[in-house]
Image (cartoon, rainbow, N blue to C red):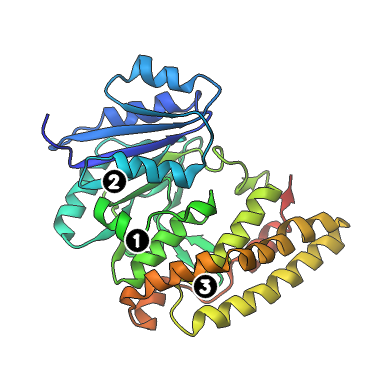
Amino acid sequence: MSAPLVSVCVANYQGRDLIESCLNSIFSQKCDFEFEVIVYDDASTDASDRTVINCFPKARLIREEKNVGYCIANHRMAENACGKYLLLFNNDASLMPGSLQALANEARAIKSPAILGLPQYDAVTKTLEDRGRLCDPFLNCLPNYEKNRKEVAMVAGACLWLPRETWFELGGFPEWFEYTAEDLYICLAARMRGYRVSIVDDGHGFYHHIGQSIGGGKIVAGRLSTTYERRFRTERNKCAVILACYPSPWHYCVFIMLAILLLLEGCTIALIKKNSKILSQVYLRALRGVWKSRQKIFEMRRKNLFGVISNSRFFSQFVWTPYKAQLLVRYGFPDLK
């Protein structure tokens, strides 16, 4: 077999009920190029690795004895990949027919480095979730539904295409993020260099069991539902992305405003719900986490300042109305578990 054009990298943890559908959707793609599939089993205990071995002998399985987390899993797959491009793909997602070819066609047409994504659909309801995402100033991400908008602020890490060389240039996902906002980071780091972040939308896409792999992060019965751990990581990691990726002096200005808003939000929710754990285990913990990780954050920033674009170009896919305020009005304060 000739060298693959793309390496499809699937991080798997406890995915026994999902991995077969995921891999079937990949291996059934009809392409005019070779591709390889790498599955990184992150110390699953549900025998999902046996499903890969028994049902998908063409997949390259990397088995880890100790759980290392989503970000490290993707780094190790990228290191072992042979393709010119990487498609980072969740085990709780499945590709629509023709989607892999569509991504390759777009990458070939662009020629320059770019991060590409596909329209995302809910795996259960089959309804459109987004055509990429826009951001507000505090990096709350809102769905893009405009069919004619190709460039976006970010694409979901559940289905993220980029050149393998660009992955290493950007430093990949920050390993200490573990999960949440890692896709936001790599997309904004790419934008800092002037690289495109775009959606390939010509009738293709992917289905995603949103929030199933790490819990929370979705609307349940008309309410926002998440976990303490996910909410903590989301707030901490968004703060880190602002400090690492925003052009000067916006990184300091926006971070200071966000820190004040997070403290106000945490105090308000704690008072309303009569639960001080929300303040201590989410908001204060997130800000302490930023302080403890300050050396890592500023090392990320030094790397991203390699090629800074204009403020107007960087923020061109941002909206200026805080999206979290809209969610609070619509759904109320989130249920934390």
Q: Are marks 1 and 2 in contact (CB under 8 Å)?
A: no
Q: Is residue 12 above or below residue 293?
A: above
Quick check: 270 left or right of 250? right
Q: State the quadrant of the N terminus.
A: top left
Numbered badge on residue 86: 2
| SS for callout 1 | helix
Which residue is disc 1 drawn over? 170
The residue drawn where x is 45% and y is 65% is 134
Q: State the quadrant of the C terminus.
A: top right
Frontmost of labels 1 and 2 is 1
> 206 or 12: which is nearer to us?
12
Q: Which residue lies most toward the top here?
A: 54
How crowded is the residue under tag 1: few (<14 C-alpha within 10 Å), some, or many (20+)?
Answer: some
- Which percent across, then down, holds residue 334? 71, 54
Numbered badge on residue 314: none
Which numbered disc flags the more N-terminal residue, 1 or 2?
2
The residue drawn where x is 43% and y is 52% is 156
What is the three-letter code of the residue carrying label 3?
Answer: Leu
| SS for callout 2 | strand
Which numbered disc flags the more N-terminal residue, 2 or 3?
2
Which residue is disc 3 drawn over? 243
Q: Which residue lies most toward the right here?
A: 274
- Which percent across, then down, holds residue 316? 38, 75
